[in-house]
Image (cartoon, rainbow, N blue to C red):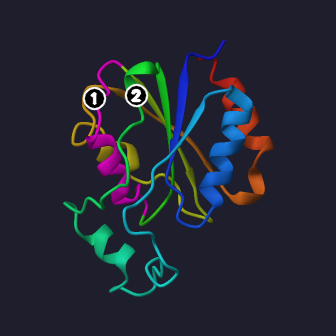
Amino acid sequence: MMSKALVAYFSASGVTKKAAQALVETIGGDLYEIIPEVLYSEADLDWRNENSRSSLEMKDKSSRPAIVKTDANVKDYDVIFVGFPIWWYIAPTIINTFLESYDFSGKTIILFATAGSSGFGKTVDNLKGSVCDTAVIKEGIRITSKQFPADIAKWAKGLKL
């Protein structure tokens, strides 16, 4: 039986949103979108341009893009799934903003990520200790848009939370 779960996600292009929705359909948790105060344009997301917004944010370890709201009520959940696209082999810095906005003491955070080819890289290591040292952070699943909803459902059912 699934513990009470929140599925929080950041989606720059819509792919991670679809993954989060598929996860909620499987586990019955609540959905929460992490929305940047300034939305990302296509030019902002151009990873080939070293001066694009996303490139500059990822180069700056202290970057914390502002988010629209911080009302996720994480205290009401046992498990928090956090989803995002992989940028430069780690979570986008807006995920740090989200995680630093709440007290995750005693919570289990399970990451899920979307990417065309990149894996989690150092994502878990970057978030453990520096961002969220009072919670258990687990690497979950990295998927492409071709793998869901079926692969998300199979993975989520196997978690046995």
Query: Quarter-wise, where is residue 13 in the image?
Result: bottom right
Q: In which quarter of the image is residue 65?
A: bottom left
Do residues under tags 1 and 2 come within 8 Å of each other at their CB atoms? yes
Left or right of 34 on screen, residue 149: right
Residue 122, position as x, y percentages in the image: 37, 51
- Sequence-first tag of 1 and 2: 2
Q: Does the magenta stretch include residue 93?
A: yes
Q: Look at the image and give the residue range highlighted in magenta.
A: 89-106
Residue positioned 55% across, 25% down in the render: 5
In the image, taking residue 86 as reference, residue 54 lies left or right, namely left
Q: How crowded is mark 1: few (under 14 residues within 10 Å), some or many (20 or more)?
A: some
Closer-to-camera residue (87/16): 16
Q: In this view, does 147 lie to the left or right of 23?
A: right
Q: Report the residue at 49% width, 24% height from top.
A: 79
Q: Position of residue 113 (x, y in %)?
A: 55, 50
Q: Who is closer to the viewer here, 140 or 107? A: 107
The kind of residue on which mark 2 rests is: Val
Residue 135 coordinates in the image, percent (x, y): 33, 26
Q: Which residue is drawn at 30% across and 50% down?
A: 97
Q: Name the residue under label 1.
A: 103
Tell me the residue at 69%/25% (across/down).
Answer: 158
Q: What number is the disc on residue 74?
A: 2
Identify the mark at residue 135; answer none if there is no mark.
Answer: none
Q: How far apart are marks 1 and 2 (CA)?
A: 8 Å
Task: State which quarter of the image contains the C terminus.
Answer: top right
- Which residue is more in the foreground, 34 or 130? 34
Residue 74, compared with residue 63, is above or below; it is above
